[in-house]
Image: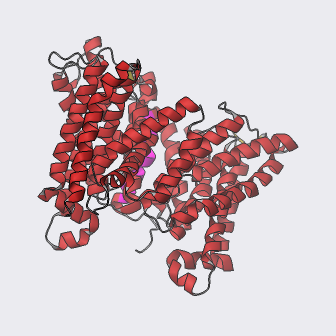
C-alpha cells in the first residue's frame, strides 16, 4: 500500500518535474545566454494554457489546439523580445526585474479582460482519458504518462539540439562569450530572438499540458514561475543539464513532501492539525532545498565557472 | 559637493514636509476624509520602501523579499491583539498585548532577528542568486504564515483593536496619520544622517566595489549584514503600522508581488537617495488608486508604464526634483 502510494506520487513528482523542466529550459537559456532575469516567463505558460483550451475547443481537438498554441506563443514571445526585452540586455538586473514585473501585470490583466476571471476547463484528449495498470492495483491516468513521455522526449531532443546542431553550437558559443561569438559572425540579435521564441514555445507546451491537470486561470503562471526560478538556481544558471536535474529534484521533493509529511506528522499529533502544519511545511520544502544547495554550492549544481 | 543644488534640495524637503502636514486638513476640507486612511497607508509603504533603499540603494543588495519583514511586523501586532481578545497565553509565559510601546518594538525585534537569519545566509551569495534567495525566504514565510491555522491560516487575523499608545486615539485617522508621518520623518532623518556617516560611506563603498573595500580591510560581510538587519527592523515597524492601518494581518502582505511593488517604489523615486523612495511610494500608490478609479483593469495600463519606467528613468523622481549634482 505504502509502496503503491510511493510509486504513484513519485510519478506525479516526475510529471511536475518535466513540466518544470520545460519552463526552466527556456528560462535558463534566457538567463544564461542573454543574462536577463525574465519574470514574465510564467505569462507564456499561462497564455499557452488559455490558447490550447480555446483553440482546442474551437477545433474540437486538444492536440490540434496544443499544436497551434505553441507556435503562436513562440511568436508572441518573439514580439515581446523585439519590443521590450531587447532593450534590457545592457541594463542591470534591477531594471529587468521591474520591466518584466510590469509585463506580468499587463499579461495577467489582459488575459483576465479577454477570458474573464473565472478559471476555464481544459480536458485531455479522449483517446488518452483512460488509466493504465502499472503494477497490480495501481491505476495511473494515461494522460499523465503522456505528459511525462512528452517532457522527457523534448528534454532529450533539446539536449541533442544543443550538443549536435549548428544552432546548438551558436547557443553554446553565445552562452560562454557573447561578444566573442558576435565577433565571429554569429547574428546575436537574431539568435536571442530565436532563443526567446523557443523558450516561450516550451513554456506554452508546459502550460497546455499542465492546464489539463490544474485549472487554467489568471495567476497560474506565477505559482510555477517561482518554482521554475528555484529550479534554475538549483541547477545552475545557463545549464540545460542543471535545469533537468533541478526540475526532477524539485518536482519529486515538492510532491513527496506533500504526500509523506501529513502521514509522518499524523503519528505525532492530531490529524486535522497535522494536515495544516504539513501543508505549510511542504510548501516550503523546495525553498529549503534551494537554500541547502546554495549553501553547499553558491552557483548551483551545474553552475557556470564565472 | 556643489552648494546650489543643496539649497534646492532643502527647499524641496521643506515643501514636501509642509505638504505632508497639510494633507489631513485639506482632505477634510474637501470632504474627502475617507482618504486620510489611504494617506496613512501611503506613508507606511513609504517607510517600507525607505527601509528597502537602505539595503538596495546604499548597499547594492537587491532584496526581492522585503515584504516578509512587513508581514512579520504585521503578524506580531495581529497575534498580540488576538491573544488579548482570546485570553490564551503565548509561549514563554507571555500574554497578548495591544500596548504599542511593547508590541511595536517587539515587531521590530522579530523582523530584525528574521533579517539576521535570512541575511546571514543570503549575503553569502551575490547578484541574481541574492535576488532569488531573498525571494525564496519570503515565499517560505508566506507559506508558513498561511499554515498558522490558529491565526486564521490564509485568511489572516482581523484586529479587534488598534494598538494603544499613551493617551493617543489611534483609531482616529488624523491622529494615526500624524503618528505615521512623525515616525517616517524620524526614520528618514536618522537614515540620512547614517548615510553620510562612516557606516554609510563604507556601505556605499561596498556597493561600488566590494573587493576593494575588503582589500582596504573592511569586514564587508558584517557591514552588509548590519544594514540588512537595520532595514528589516524598519520594515517590521512599517508592518506593525500597516496592521494597524488596515486592522488586519494576512499572508497576502508577504506576497512576492508586494516585494515587487516595494522595488518599483524605490526605483521610481530614485534609488540610493532615501528621500526618493518616499516620493516613489506616494507616486505609485496615488497612481494605482487613480487608475483603479478610472478602470477596473488598471493593471493593463500600469504594467506598460512600469516597463517604460524601467527602460527610461535613471535617477527617479527625486533626481529630477533635486536637479543635477550627481551626489545622492
Left or right: residue B122 compared with residue B35: left
Report the magenta stretch's main SS.
helix
Question: What range of the chain is rendered magenta?
Answer: A280-294
Left or right: residue A247 compared with residue B115: right
Which residue is at 40% across, 28% downward? Answer: B250
Residue A232 screen position, x and y as percent: 50, 59
Residue A5 screen position, x and y as percent: 58, 39
Q: In which quarter of the image is residue A156?
A: bottom right
Q: In this view, does A2 lie above or below A303?
A: above
Q: In this view, does B79 lie above or below B48?
A: above
Which residue is at 23% across, 61% downward? Answer: B204
Image quadrant holding the C terminus of chain B, namely: bottom left
Q: Which of A298 and A90 is in front in this view?
A: A90
Which residue is at 50% across, 77% downward? Answer: A176
Residue A284 screen position, x and y as percent: 42, 42
Left or right: residue A201 compared with residue B196: right
Q: Residue furthest right?
A: A59
Can residue A38 be seen in the rendering of this structure? Answer: yes
Q: Which of B149 and B6 is in front in this view?
A: B6
Amino acid at each position: 500500500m505504502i509502496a503503491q502510494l510511493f510509486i504513484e506520487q513519485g510519478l506525479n513528482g516526475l510529471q511536475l518535474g518535466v513540466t518544470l523542466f520545460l519552463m526552466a529550459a527556456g528560462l535558463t537559456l534566457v538567463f544564461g545566454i542573454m543574462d536577463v532575469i525574465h519574470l514574465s516567463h510564467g505569462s507564456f505558460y499561462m497564455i499557452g494554457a488559455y490558447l490550447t483550451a480555446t483553440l482546442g475547443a474551437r477545433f474540437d481537438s486538444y492536440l490540434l489546439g496544443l499544436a497551434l498554441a505553441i507556435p503562436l506563443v513562440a511568436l508572441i514571445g518573439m514580439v515581446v523580445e523585439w519590443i521590450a526585452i531587447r532593450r534590457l540586455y545592457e541594463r542591470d538586473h534591477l531594471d529587468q526585474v521591474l520591466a518584466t514585473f510590469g509585463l506580468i501585470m499587463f499579461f495577467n490583466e489582459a488575459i483576465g479582460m479577454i477570458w474573464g476571471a473565472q478559471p476555464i476547463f481544459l480536458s485531455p484528449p479522449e483517446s488518452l482519458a483512460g488509466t493504465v495498470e502499472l503494477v497490480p492495483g495501481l491505476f495511473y491516468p494515461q494522460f499523465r504518462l503522456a505528459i511525462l513521455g512528452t517532457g522527457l522526449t523534448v528534454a532529450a531532443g533539446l539536449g541533442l539540439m544543443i550538443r549536435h546542431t549548428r544552432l546548438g553550437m551558436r547557443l553554446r558559443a553565445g552562452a560562454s562569450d557573447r561578444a566573442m561569438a558576435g565577433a565571429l559572425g554569429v547574428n546575436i540579435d537574431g539568435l536571442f530572438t530565436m532563443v526567446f521564441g523557443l523558450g516561450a514555445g516550451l513554456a506554452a507546451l508546459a502550460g497546455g499540458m499542465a492546464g489539463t491537470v490544474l485549472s487554467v486561470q489568471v495567476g497560474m503562471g506565477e505559482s510555477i514561475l517561482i518554482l521554475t526560478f528555484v529550479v534554475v538556481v538549483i541547477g545552475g544558471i545557463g545549464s540545460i543539464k542543471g535545469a533537468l536535474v533541478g526540475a526532477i529534484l524539485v518536482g519529486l521533493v515538492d510532491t513527496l513532501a506533500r504526500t509523506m509529511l501529513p502521514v509522518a506528522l499524523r503519528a505525532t499529533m492530531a490529524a486535522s492539525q497535522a494536515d495544516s502544519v504539513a501543508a505549510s511545511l511542504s510548501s516550503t520544502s523546495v525553498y529549503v532545498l534551494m537554500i541547502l544547495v546554495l549553501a553547499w554550492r553558491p552557483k548551483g549544481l551545474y553552475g557556470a565557472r564565472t | 559637493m556643489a552648494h546650489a543644488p543643496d539649497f534646492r534640495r532643502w527647499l524641496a524637503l521643506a515643501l514636501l514636509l509642509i505638504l505632508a502636514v497639510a494633507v489631513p486638513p485639506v482632505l477634510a476640507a474637501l470632504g474627502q476624509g475617507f482618504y486620510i486612511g489611504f494617506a496613512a497607508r501611503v506613508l507606511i509603504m513609504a517607510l517600507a520602501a525607505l527601509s528597502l533603499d537602505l539595503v538596495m540603494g546604499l548597499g547594492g543588495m537587491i532584496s526581492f523579499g522585503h515584504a516578509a519583514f512587513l508581514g512579520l511586523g504585521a503578524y506580531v501586532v495581529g497575534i498580540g491583539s488576538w491573544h488579548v481578545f482570546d485570553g490564551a497565553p503565548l509561549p514563554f509565559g507571555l500574554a497578548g498585548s495591544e500596548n504599542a510601546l511593547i508590541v511595536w518594538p517587539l515587531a521590530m525585534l522579530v523582523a530584525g532577528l528574521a533579517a539576521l537569519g535570512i541575511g546571514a545566509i543570503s549575503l553569502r551569495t551575490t547578484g541574481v542568486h541574492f535576488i532569488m534567495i531573498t525571494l525564496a525566504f519570503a515565499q517560505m514565510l508566506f507559506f508558513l504564515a498561511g499554515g498558522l491555522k490558529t491565526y486564521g491560516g490564509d485568511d489572516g487575523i482581523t484586529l479587534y483593536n488598534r494598538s494603544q499608545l499613551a493617551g493617543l486615539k489611534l483609531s482616529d485617522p488624523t491622529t494615526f496619520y500624524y503618528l505615521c508621518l512623525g515616525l517616517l520623518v524620524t526614520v528618514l532623518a536618522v537614515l540620512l544622517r547614517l548615510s553620510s556617516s562612516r557606516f554609510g560611506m563604507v556601505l556605499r563603498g561596498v556597493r561600488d566595489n566590494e573587493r576593494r573595500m575588503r582589500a582596504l580591510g573592511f569586514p564587508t560581510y558584517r557591514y552588509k549584514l548590519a544594514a540588512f538587519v537595520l532595514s528589516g527592523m524598519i520594515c517590521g515597524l512599517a508592518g506593525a503600522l500597516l496592521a494597524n492601518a488596515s486592522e488586519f494581518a494576512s499572508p497576502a502582505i508577504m506576497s512576492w508581488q508586494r516585494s515587487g511593488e516595494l522595488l518599483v517604489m524605490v526605483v521610481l523615486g530614485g534609488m540610493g537617495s532615501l528621500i526618493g523612495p518616499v516620493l516613489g511610494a506616494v507616486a505609485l500608490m496615488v497612481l494605482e488608486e487613480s487608475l483603479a478609479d478610472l478602470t477596473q483593469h488598471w493593471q493593463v495600463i500600469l504594467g506598460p508604464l512600469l516597463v517604460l519606467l524601467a527602460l527610461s528613468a535613471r535617477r527617479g523622481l527625486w533626481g529630477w526634483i533635486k536637479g543635477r549634482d550627481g551626489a545622492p
